[in-house]
Image: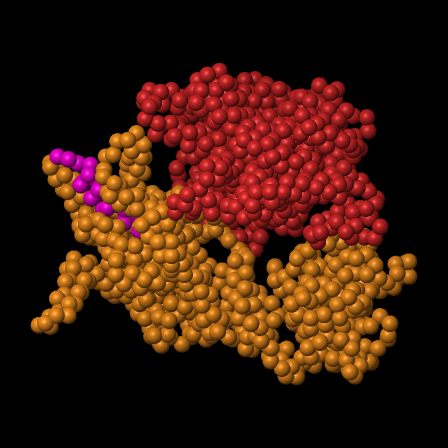
Chain colours: A orange, B red
Amino acid sequence: IWVSEMLQLPLVVTAQVDLLLVLVSLLAFWTRLSHLSYPNAVVFDEVYYGQFVSLYMKRVFFIDDSGPPLGHMILAFGAYLGGFDGNFVWNRIGAEYPTTVNVWSLRLLPALCGALCVPLVYLLTLELKFSHLSALGAAVLLLLENSLIVQSRFMLLESVLIFFVLLAFFSYLRFHNASWSRYIWLILSGVSCGAVVGVKYMGLFSYLLLLVVASLHTWKLIGDKTISHRNVCVQCVHRVLCLVVVPVLLYVFWFYVHLSFLNRSGPHDQLMSSAFQASLQGGLSRITRGQPLEVAYGSQVTLRSSVSQPIPCWLHSHKVNYPIRYDNGRGSSHQQQVTCYPFKDVNNWWIIKDPGRQQLVVDTPPRPVRHGDVIQLVHGMTSRFLNSHDVAAPMSPHTQEVSGYIDFNVSMPAQNLWRVDISNREAESEVWKTILSEVRLVHVNTSAVLKLSGVPLPDWGFRQLEVVADKLFKAHSSSLEWTVEEHRYGTSQEQKEREAELHSPTHIDVDRKISFWAKFVELQWKMLTVKQEESEHKYSSSPLEWITMETNIAYWLHSSTNAQIHLIGNPVSWGVGNLSLLAYQLLAVVYLLRRRRGLKDVPDGVWDQFVCLGCVCVGGWLVNFVPFLLMDKTLFLYHYLPALCYLYLLSPALLEHAHTHLLSSLTHQRALCVGALAVLLSIFLTYRTFCPLTYGSPELSAHQLQGLKWRDTWDILYRRR
Amino acid sequence: MLVAGLSFSTRLYKLTEPPHVCWDETHFGKMGSYYINRTFFFDVHPPLGKMLIGLAGYMSGYNGTFPFIKPGDKYENQNYWGMRGFCAVLGSFLPIFAYLIVLELSNSCTAAIIAATLLIFDTGCITISQYILLDPILMFFIMAAVLSMVKFNQQRYRSFTASWWFWLVLTGINLAGALGVKFVGLFVIVLVGLNTIGDLWRLLGDMSLSLVDIAKHFLARAFALILLPLILYVTIFAVHFVVLNKSGPGDGFFSSAFQSRLIGNNLHNASMPEYLAFGSTVTIKNLRIAGGYLHSHWHLYPEGVGARQQQVTAYLHKDYNNLWVVHRQQDNNSQSGNPDLVRHGDIVRLEHKETTRNLHSHLHEAPLTKKHFQVTGYGINGTGDANDLWQMEVCGGRKGDPVKVLRSKVRFLHRATGCVLYSSGKTLPKWGWEQIEVTCSPYLKETPSSQWNIEDHINPKLPNISLSVLKPNFLEILLESHIVMFRGNSGLKPKDNEMNSKPWHWPINYQGLRFSGVNATEYRVYLLGNPVVWWINLASLGLYFTMVAVASIATQRGFSLGQQRIEHSLVLVRGGGLLMLGWLLHYAPFFTMGRILYFHHYFPAMLFSSMLTGLTLDILFRSADLLLHPPYSYWFQRTGQLLLLFSILYSFYLFHPLSYGMTGPLAHEPGSAMAGLKWMDSWEF
């Protein structure tokens, strides 16, 4: 909507309203927003995003490796507006929402974003310097795309991503083309770039494309000798600030909001370091609050391994020995087992002992343990010393066995001295601190390092994880690091009293904080490295199948009738998109070759426009499609939707180009127009045909459903009656 | 000459030490022996490298009898020096090639000498050239291809002369060589391809050339750089298949038709009943390339993976668990008299011979391909249910056609659900012994994955007929062996416990590879680049980017530069760009690879990086007059060059035991000869 106000006398307001734009926008809102709360049941991936929305409402900390937090926060904001209290269990697709859940508000924001994409595409086409008719064409293609409608109408993130991508490109091009109030657009572009990357990691590629386009423009600017050096510098700095610094800051800001919002302990605590956990309310911080900070001789501690793969666990021992012979015939020391155990247990307690003295209690004042000190570790419940020797470990025979030492009098002397090596002593201190220090225990006799191998032991070891001492001295392997988690100063020398002491819970009070940056880095790293069990899904597909729309996804099926919702695109538009992609590439190659031979088919201005179109649309398609080919993840058809939007942007513009510059005779031009109209009509008809599968109503008979199965590979569900 | 002399002497020094098998010699030495013995084997790399190793061994009097079982085995009296010497000689050419390439690209002798020095005194390059490995051969061909390409570029104003043709054809030959050794050769092909496209683009813009001339140029390049290498590459495979004509350890990976070529294989001149009959014992092979035999064993599917019944998989090796008995729906005891033939459309029940379970499917999700149904072994001793029945169809057959052993493609359609027996090609996790998944697919499209053939056929009641199985033609063999190789390559996934080397480790020389010896008492060789050389390379990459950025912004802004400066920036952008592209092409793709990676994969990229360093540093020294006045800038230039030379030589002196062998205590223990040289904790010497 163009509104230009001119202050003159007499005071008048002239408003220009692009009626086409208003019309498509209204239609978009109607297609995306009508009957939004139907079906009143959990649809497809709502079951996945929903759990995070609930956790936001309860302010419980979680980790999700599927994307940065902005997307989840937007969904949660929608839920917040609707007064959702987080009390709904998202456990099954198709489960009915209770009346307390405001479904409409849950789905509102993605639907709004989806609807706004339509006018954005219209404006973007205009910024690419194509006509209003082309803009209308692109908007209609987007408007009547069934898959986009389905994806926008539920609590999913693709429409949000597409919205921000389009907004970023639109505002950047507006900045590039406009002569006045340009920097507002540049800032808006930077902000939307930050949002794009904040919603999904895939957005990063679109962002990079925008940076490439911007740097090409900047490169031209640098070459422009009519502008002074100073002016060039200023402009470059502006661009870098808005397009690089702003998005990066925003990205960090999303995490800041995320972390400051989620301050309660929850299901994923265990994945994080002890220090991180201690900063959350409840959970570990409730237990560890008030522990003494410095580990001293006589301290009673639990030692947690720094790796959280496969599961977090604590150094453990129990009154069972290694079997004399393993299944494969190898022998063991038959001493007491030492393992890593993923649950809190009284057998996880160890006491730190000075090798030169007998006592197991803390002196007053306590003598703290420092980097380089040699200690012994006594198992609290069994009083065995942590020991290692040149015997092959049960599951990893290339490493040394670790045991609780028992003297069988078989000339196997105790080797139970360990040197404390605090690996983050530069950042923390030379003194061994609870939670904060990452410690390696180096075996004095063999200089092997205590290590969690992570291999589960067989039944004789109760499936607990194997702990070994590894001679290889590899830097920075977190399987070598241990932190003290629970800690208290031991007071009883007698075994019986000590056992009672170990059984009693710890408390004393202090609060510990770690900085936002430390939390941000840890969370980001964990998100990128946490691997979830990837397996094929019934509706998953491979990227090459997307081009031909080989598969669909069933989103929802009514619990008793045949009414159902599928993610199926509009086959006609899909074909048009693919065709125009091909046509553009062919045309570009022909143009390039001919221009190289000095034959200029189109004037330079038009050529620039053509190149810009290709950069944005074909480039956009490539960056949103090719990376999937290299990914090892479970992929779905909806991953293709951002790439598809670029094709819809391309098609009408290319048609206009052909109409104006390729076809010379009037009859050809008319034929093209008629053809385009016919295609539009058939797009509308197919949209109508697939509407029942898009909106989930009306219910179709099995026969009608059969008729909609245009491809053999589509899975459409029939209820047997 | 000096470069050549130094290069050969560093590579050939202490060549025969250690006198035992080192690291991957266990593979490539063994494969060389296979060529001498003419035994068929399977490897994920194309054959040229191993053929050359075999040839070198043969020429130097090695008789192919050494088993190469594991690293550390003593060679005793075997003539292993021939194979090592061959690799070392090829490896010695690398610095010479680097010298010539940089000389062509920069026209500066200093740059060329820097590049060659970096390579001559790099411990990593020395170590990797001294053993029976594919890498020296691969790198030889890569560098030779780049050299001939650069030479060819110099001939651009003498089109279609003899020397023009010579370098063009030589480029093509070297490309074929590089690809014939390892698939990494593809990267240098891409490099040459991009260079050629750029070249053609330049010609296209040259208005003095007519379109016919351009077509001639195009055709000449297409012939020499596409057709010729292709022919050579195919020839290499032809030689490979002709030489290896005896059955060996690689048979099971290939189709029945392929196996019939190999002397000693049970399908070679096989004789068995011609038509499949009820009561026969058979093995059933999937027609997918590297598809495997239908297999079952006593183990059950684990909890949570469909029904807890016996596993059915596809297995690549020959095994008695691959045997199945073909039964009618009901009867179990074969009747007297001549058995009935199985015909198209007949209902059969397949009983696993070892466990007497029936091949069974039902409406449970398959373990990996969730869209398909699970296939299990069910029932015992002939009892079962209606889900054990399969309809046998001959592809392209009509009702009543008999099923020909080996030759018919058959499908098994499940009666109850209508799905078809299918091998997805995905590897099952540990519980399935990493065999291949077998499912029942509801999609009935005819693909090789759903087609099977009967391979072994045992029925004492039928007369055996000698089958001269359709010998596959050469193209089929070629295609098949390639698909098998690619499968093999992508199947090399890192194991959980193994320390995996990451691509970002490589340029910083983060961690090497142990070639030989672990303990203090052993003779140790450790593949690790000379850290000074590698870190100079790394720094030069950054320097290169800065210099190019400064130079191009200056040009774009239209600052007036001197003639000499313009030449420098041209060398930087053109020559440096080519080397940079080479480095990127040989390095970046590894980030996307899912297979297991090793440190030595970086060496081809390191060659490019070293050449780039030579070029960059030379121009940096020459540009000293930007900041300093003439006499000082000259001194700066000389001092810089000498300092560089000295630091490389001194670091080589320090680190040479890495390549030439160390004994005594490890570096972090007291009394070691390498004490104080463990600059990074991750080095393990």
Q: Is residue A71 above or below residue A433?
A: above
Q: Where's residue B329, x and y in %?
A: 48, 37
The residue drawn where x is 46% and y is 29% is B409
Q: In the drawing, does residue B657 fall left or right of residue A8? A: right
- Residue A61 seen in the figure: yes
Residue A23, percent from left and from top: 17, 60
Residue A653 included in the magenta stretch of the image? yes
Q: Quarter of the image for the C terminus of chain A: give it.
A: bottom left
Rendered view: B195 above or below A227? above
Closer to the camera in the image, A550 or A588? A588
Residue sitting at x 78%, y 32%? B14
Q: Which of B421/B223 is in front? A: B223
Q: Position of residue A79 (x, y in %)?
A: 37, 72
Report how many numbered discs are placed on residues in the image: 0
Position of B78 relative to A606 (above/below): above
The residue shown at (64%, 24%) is B52
Q: Which residues are magenta?
A: A642-665
Left or right for A5, reference B121: left
User: What's the residue at 64%, 64% (across, down)?
Assistant: A306
